[in-house]
Image: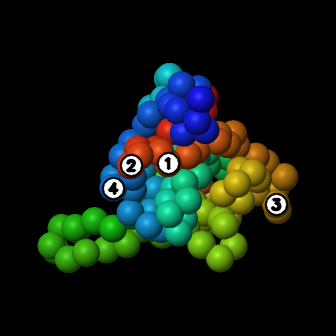
């Protein structure tokens, strides 16, 4: 059995690669667990969608949206591709995107293995 087919058997499909632009995240629900999936230079990282500070939805980090004046605005926070971190959109806590750790507070959120296979993103729950 190939590594890719093993991933398809052991992991849960959560999105298509094209759903997650580079440097951004989306929220998914996998087996009842709320997870944020981030695309960092074509590699995918999965961690709890809730910040360990005050439970902000991490996937909104750096989100772009139309505001009431019909201009594009960007949410606070975002993915740092060089540091492999994501900063929370509410109070900018910076979390290690691989370990889920916030170094200053010592708090940590869960992380999950994520892989892209044949255009889809899979997470091991
Ligand atoms: S809720 Fe994330 S930094 Fe405060």
Q: Calculate the distance from the C-alpha at mark 2 to the C-alpha at mark 3.
A: 34 Å
Q: Which mark is residue 116?
A: 1
* Residues under numbered marks 1 and 3 in contact, where contact means CB atoms less than 8 Å apart: no
Asked which secondary structure carries label 4, the reply is helix
Q: Calculate the distance from the C-alpha at mark 2 to the C-alpha at mark 1.
A: 6 Å
In the figure, 73 relative to 9: above or below?
A: below
In the figure, 30 relative to 104: above or below?
A: above
Q: Is mark 4 within 8 Å of ligand 1?
A: no
* Residues under numbered marks 2 and 4 in contact, where contact means CB atoms less than 8 Å apart: yes
Asked which secondary structure carries label 3, the reply is loop
User: In the orientation shown, which residue stands out farthest toward the left?
Assistant: 70
Q: Which residue is mark 2?
A: 119
Structural crowding at the residue carrying mark 2, measured as other residues with C-alpha within 10 Å and reported as few (<14), some (14–19) or many (≥20)? few
Mark 2 vs 3, N-terminal side: 3
Mark 2 vs 4, N-terminal side: 4
Q: Which mark is residue 76?
A: none
The image quadrant of residue 94 is: bottom right
Q: Which residue is mark 4?
A: 18
Query: Residue 19's x, y, as percent?
Result: 33, 52
Q: Calculate the distance from the C-alpha at mark 1 to the C-alpha at mark 3.
A: 28 Å
Query: Residue 9's x, y, as percent?
Result: 54, 25
Q: Which mark is residue 103?
A: 3
Structural crowding at the residue carrying mark 1, measured as other residues with C-alpha within 10 Å and reported as few (<14), some (14–19) or many (≥20)? some
Q: Calculate the distance from the C-alpha at mark 3 to the C-alpha at mark 4.
A: 32 Å
Mark 1 vs 3, N-terminal side: 3
Give the residue at x 49% y 23%: 32
* Residues under numbered marks 2 and 1 in contact, where contact means CB atoms less than 8 Å apart: yes
Q: Calculate the distance from the C-alpha at mark 4 to the C-alpha at mark 1.
A: 11 Å
Structural crowding at the residue carrying mark 4, measured as other residues with C-alpha within 10 Å and reported as few (<14), some (14–19) or many (≥20)? few
């Amino acid at each position: 059995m190939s590594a890719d087919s093993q991933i398809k058997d052991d992991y849960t499909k959560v999105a298509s690669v094209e759903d997650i632009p580079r440097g951004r995240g989306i929220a998914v629900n996998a087996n009842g667990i709320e997870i944020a999936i981030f695309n960092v230079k074509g590699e995918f990282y999965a961690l709890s969608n809730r910040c360990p500070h005050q439970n902000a939805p991490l996937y909104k980090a750096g989100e772009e949206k139309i505001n009431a004046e019909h201009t594009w605005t960007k949410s606070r926070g975002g993915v740092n591709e060089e540091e492999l971190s994501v900063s929370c959109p509410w109070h900018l806590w910076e979390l290690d995107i691989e370990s889920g750790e916030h170094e200053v507070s010592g708090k940590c959120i869960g992380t999950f293995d994520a892989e892209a296979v044949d255009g889809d993103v899979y997470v091991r729950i």
